[in-house]
Image: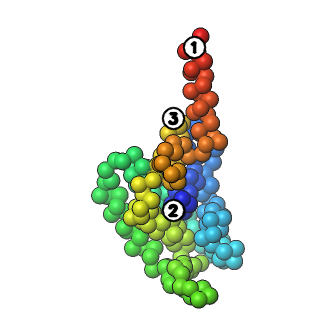
């Protein structure tokens, strides 16, 4: 079972509610490049090449960053509705299909040793296609068996998405050491108050 999806991690690049960081990892185009490099979407060499192109074409970089922000919002809208078992609006899928149509030309089959793998053609000139793997993993998740394990953190002050990898599908929080721990402490304190 796959639990690490680019699309879910992409949705987490901005703080959720007041308790989270108030920054946006994608505040600048360089932040987007850095995130792509960290996720393995870009090699260090590709990241340098893309950054150099962005420095030469700031208007294109700004447009690509706006597109990334819009894609992030769309991905979150789609996945959070699925996680809450809500009906998906047709317009959301049409918007995702438009992004797929734009992004998929960068997908290629490549011989890696004796195996054939899907890879992405990184065209440093096409700054708007950096998030192609995010868009594709959104579609892959929506059509995969793991989609039934997509969850939204149950903490009152959280909204992160995650794949529930537990055997009995009972995971409730995005992170047991953060949201899960705070929820348990809150329940403990409430029990203590009610016992008094």
Does label 3 or label 2 sit earlier along the sequence? 2
Task: Note whether 147 is above or below 37 in the view shown.
Answer: above
Task: Note whether 160 is above or below 196 in the view shown.
Answer: below
Q: Decide which of 41, 53 is in the foreground and name it.
A: 41
Mark 1 sits on what residue?
Answer: 195
Does label 3 or label 1 sit earlier along the sequence? 3
Q: Is residue 92 left or right of residue 157?
A: left
Q: Residue at x 59, y 89 (%)?
A: 114
Q: Residues within 10 Å of mark 3 (few under 14, many from 20)?
A: few
Q: Is residue 5 left or right of residue 138?
A: right
Q: How is the image coloured?
A: rainbow
Can you name the residue that lies furthest to the top here? 196
Q: Residue at x 44, y 62 (%)?
A: 141
Mark 3 sits on what residue?
Answer: 156
Q: Position of residue 75 (x, y in %)?
A: 45, 57
Task: Note whether 156 is above or below 151 in the view shown.
Answer: above
Q: Residues within 10 Å of mark 1 (few under 14, many from 20)?
A: few
Q: Residue at x 61, y 43 (%)?
A: 176
Helix, strand, or loop for circle 2? loop
| Separation of marks 3 and 2 at Cα, in angstroms | 28 Å
| Separation of marks 2 and 1 at Cα, in angstroms | 43 Å
Is label 3 in contact with label 2 (beta carbons under 8 Å)?
no
| Separation of marks 3 and 1 at Cα, in angstroms | 24 Å
Mark 2 sits on what residue?
Answer: 1
Q: Residues within 10 Å of mark 2 (few under 14, many from 20)?
A: few
Q: Position of residue 46 (x, y in %)?
A: 65, 77
Is label 2 in contact with label 1 (beta carbons under 8 Å)?
no
Is label 3 in contact with label 1 (beta carbons under 8 Å)?
no
């Amino acid at each position: 079972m796959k639990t690490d999806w680019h699309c879910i991690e992409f949705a987490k690049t901005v703080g959720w509610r007041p308790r989270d960081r108030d920054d946006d990892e994608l505040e600048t185009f360089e932040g987007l490049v850095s995130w792509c490099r960290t996720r393995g979407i870009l090699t260090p060499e590709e990241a340098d090449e893309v950054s150099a192109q962005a420095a030469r074409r700031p208007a294109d970089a700004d447009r690509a960053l706006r597109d990334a922000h819009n894609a992030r919002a769309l991905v979150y809208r789609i996945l959070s509705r699925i996680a809450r078992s809500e009906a998906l609006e047709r317009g959301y899928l049409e918007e995702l299909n438009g992004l797929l149509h734009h992004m998929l030309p960068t997908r290629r089959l490549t011989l890696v040793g004796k195996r054939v793998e899907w890879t992405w053609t990184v065209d440093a000139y096409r700054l708007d296609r950096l998030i192609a793997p995010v868009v594709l993993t959104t579609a892959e998740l929506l059509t995969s068996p793991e989609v039934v394990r997509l969850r939204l953190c149950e903490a009152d002050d959280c909204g992160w998405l995650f794949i529930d990898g537990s055997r009995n599908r009972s995971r409730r929080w995005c992170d047991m050491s953060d949201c899960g721990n705070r929820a348990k402490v809150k329940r403990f304190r409430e029990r203590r108050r009610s016992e008094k």
